Amino acid sequence: MSSLNRRFLRTIAMTLTAGCSLLFGSSIRADVIFIDDFDSQPAEAGDGTPVGYFSFGDQLSDRGVSNAFGATSGTNSAFYVINFSGNAADAFGVGAAHVGLSLSLDPNHFVSVQVRIPEGLVSGGFIGFRIADKDGTVVRTADTDLFAATGTFQPITQSLASLSHTDFTGATGGLDYSQIDSVGLLFFDRDFTGTTTVVFDDLRITAVPEPSSGLLIACAAAIVTAYRRQKNHESVALADLLEFLFFKNSNLQPLQILKPFLINLKSN
């Protein structure tokens, strides 16, 4: 591939990266149905379950609301300290659920949260969403779809319809989206050993994906399209492009949501 085409691809990458970064940092908001940002709650040193939350799991060491870990909106965020035992892969660890809700939702709605692990001790997916109805049916993120976290706040998003694992079935069977009683998170022990702090903020239900996730998908699709238009059997420019986007630019780390696009890009 000529150096001209390679420069063309790099220019596309830089332009898309800059545009995506500006969009992700904008104040555009999805249609919010429910949100916990913890800013109206007192910041405590610890051992204080966030207001309205039910916490469970033997590996839970501490929890609370704090202004010491940063936040994605306001000053406060929730934190859970977990003692991972390393006993079994994919074993249930700790749960945090806002209970006593009365939400009428739709399978096409989305649940999202901003999450970080300050110590950075855990690698791989271990975070899942959990929702329950008033009848006792509980569904969650499947083991194969668990989300990872990093040392900085990152958004994770999932449609309610894709919460495909049923933990408990109520008397009538099936999740009643018109009678949602709780929304929360699960943290799984996947052969991890040691103590880590999971910090989360802006747990919400929206009618459309959060802008950061939706725009990331759109930008990835645009990059794929641009590459295909300049496609050549040589891979030098492609490698250049991927290196720039996902290793040299801190604003666009390779999030899980990009996996399908990267696989598509590499296979063509």
Image (cartoon, rainbow, N blue to C red):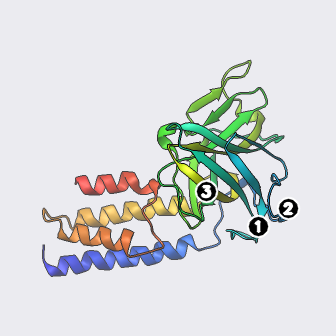
Q: In which quarter of the image is residue 180?
A: top right
Is mark 2 in CB contact (under 8 Å) with mark 1? yes
- Between label 1 and label 3, give the one nearer the viewer: 3
What residue do we see at 37% from left, 64% from top? Answer: 222
Mark 2 lies on a secondary structure that is loop
Residue 160 versus residue 117 in the image, above or below: above
Q: In the picture, which quadrant includes the C terminus? A: bottom left
Residue 28 in view (yes/no): yes
Q: Position of residue 131 (x, y in %)?
A: 69, 39
- Tag 1 residue: 76
Sooner in the amino-acid sequence: mark 1 or mark 3: 1
Q: Position of residue 110 (x, y in %)?
A: 62, 48
Q: What kind of residue is marked 3?
A: Thr
Question: Could you classify mark 1 by the number of other residues whose Cα lies within 10 Å: few (under 14), some (14-19), or many (20 or more)?
Answer: many
Q: Is residue 209 left or right of residue 105?
A: left
Q: Position of residue 85 (x, y in %)?
A: 58, 43
Q: What kind of residue is marked 2?
A: Gln
Residue 17 versus residue 121 in the image, above or below: below
- Tag 3 residue: 196
- Tag 2 residue: 41
Q: In the picture, which quadrant includes the N terminus? A: bottom left
Q: Distance between the residues labelled 1 and 3?
A: 19 Å
Q: Position of residue 41 (x, y in %)?
A: 85, 61
Mark 3 lies on a secondary structure that is strand
- Between label 2 and label 3, give the one nearer the viewer: 3
Mark 1 lies on a secondary structure that is loop
Sooner in the amino-acid sequence: mark 2 or mark 1: 2
Q: Distance between the residues labelled 2 and 1?
A: 8 Å
Q: Nearer the viewer, residue 171 or 167?
A: 167
Sooner in the amino-acid sequence: mark 2 or mark 3: 2
